Structures are given as structure tokens and as C-alpha cells.
Amino acid sequence: MKKIMCKNAGLSLMLIGMILLSSFMLIKPADKPTFYVIGDSTVKNGKGRGDGGLWGWGDFIAQYFDTTRISVENDALGGTSSRTFQTLGLWDKVLAKVKPGDFVIMQFGHNDAGALDDTARARGTIKGIGNEQQEIYNPIRKVQEVVHTYGWYMRKYIADIKARGATPIICSPIPRNFWKEGKFAGRRNQDSYGQWARELGEETGTYFVDLNKMIADDYEAEGEARVKATYFGTDATHTFEPGAQLNAKIVIQGIRSFNTLALNKYLK
């Protein structure tokens, strides 16, 4: 009788052990948050491999984070505007991955000033942050399309991100390498995308990094000769690696400036 009882007790303990082991195996470890980066070629140039010596600041942002605790994904694409990143389906692909606790930083504006319906790009947006709209025939996509303002498209990113339980961050566009009489003239903070990005941040209660002003201040301090020789390629927009590294550093300075931004706890 004692042998039978011992045997049953042993079987019971084995069964309990198997149940506990199965329970632990079924418990999925919490997913790491992801920091998504979206924007144009000043954020990721080409495929992000330094083709032509050119880089975007998003290519160097991961080095500031503890990637054992947070993933960093640069989904920017050169040539896109706040409009075409959406109409080409790129935003839908990113948004499908966004989950509660994630972060999305965005920088658009360099390509928004283009024509609404030209045969080369058809990527422009209506200037400003109002609710104006215009119906056009898009010769690239060969469809009728209602085009909105820069602000309308940016608000959609913000609303979509918040609806997913994630945190949006807006950047004003990096400044172009323009100088006049030895003074830096590449700011876009008045009646342009720098100003509009700031206004959107204030209106929607979204974290805003004034990348345009912060970088422009640095350029003025460094001087025209050094900036032109060190940071830029063949045009006034796209940066060599030192320029992209500087821009990434300044993005991080902006992020660190917000005491309430949870993204900070993942920085090194």
C-alpha cells in the first residue's frame, strides 16, 4: 500500500512539475519597445549604405541607445514628402508594426515644397498647417487625388501613432547649406516648415525637436568654410558622414531636453 501511495505521490509531483514548466514556456517575455524613424533622404540617404559618401542622421541614431532594451528602426526613404510617404503605402507598413510603448520620430519638409502634380515627382503639399485641399490628377500614380497641407499629413502621423499607444516626436527639417555675406541663411523657421513643425507640436501636444534651429546655431558657430568643407556633398541638402553624425547628436540633445519623454530611459 505504501509503495502505491509513494508511486502516486511521485506521479502527482511529476504532473505538477510538468504543468509549471508548461506555464513558464507559455509566458511570452515582454517585447522590447521600438524607436521608429521616418523621413526623407536627409534621414536615410539611398539604402543607408553611404552611397556617394552621403548619409542621413537616422543611420547613426541607434548608437546612442541601449539596443538590448530597445530596437531602433530607420524606415525613412529618400525623395518622399509628408504626403508621398503616406500615399505610397510606406506609412501603413510602419504603422502596422507600431505597438503600445513604442516611439516614432518624424522629419519631413524638404520635398513638400515641390509641385503637386508634375510628371517628375508629384510629391508637393499645400503650404501651411490649415485644412486647405486641392483635387489633382496624379500623373505618377495615374489617379485623382485630393492633396492636403503639410500640417494635415503631419497631424495624421501624430493621430495614428497616439491611437496605437505610442509616442510621436516631430523634428523640423535640417537646414540647407546656404550662406549670405558670411552669415548662415539656411534657416526655415519663419513662414516655412520649421515654423509649421513647431506650431504642430504646440497644437497637438507633441514633443518637438527644433532641429532646424539647433543645427543652424551650430553651423553659425563653426563658420561657413568648415561647414561647407566638412558636412556637405555636392548639393546644399545632403550630408557626408560627419554632417549626419552631427545631426544625429543634435537630435539626441533634443530628446534629452524632455524630462517627461520616456524614450530617455533607453539612452546610454
Image: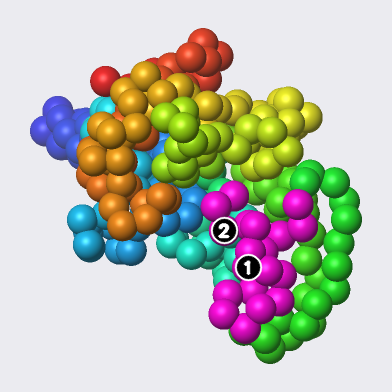
What amino acid type is highlighted by mark number 1?
Answer: Arg
Between residue 46 and residue 61, name the one nearer to us. 46
Counting other residues with Cα less than 10 Å from the Cα at mark 2, is it few (<14), some (14-19), or many (20 or more)?
many
Image position of 163 with respect to 63: above or below? below
- Residue 110 in magenta stretch: yes
The coloring applied to the image is rainbow
Between residue 88 and residue 161, name the one nearer to us. 88
Query: Residue 111 shows which numbered tag?
Result: 2
Between residue 67 and residue 250, name the one nearer to us. 250
- What kind of secondary structure does the magenta stretch mostly adopt? loop
Query: Residue 123 shows which numbered tag?
Result: 1
Name the spot of residue 196 as percent of width and height, x first: 71, 38
Residue 69 visible in this rendered orientation of the protein: no
Q: In this picture, which residue range is highlighted in magenta?
A: 109-127
Give the Cα distance between marks 2 and 1: 7 Å
**Of the image marks 2 and 1, the number of the one nearer the N terminus:** 2
Name the spot of residue 101 as percent of width and height, x first: 51, 33
Name the spot of residue 246 as percent of width and height, x first: 31, 32
Name the spot of residue 36 as percent of width and height, x first: 45, 44
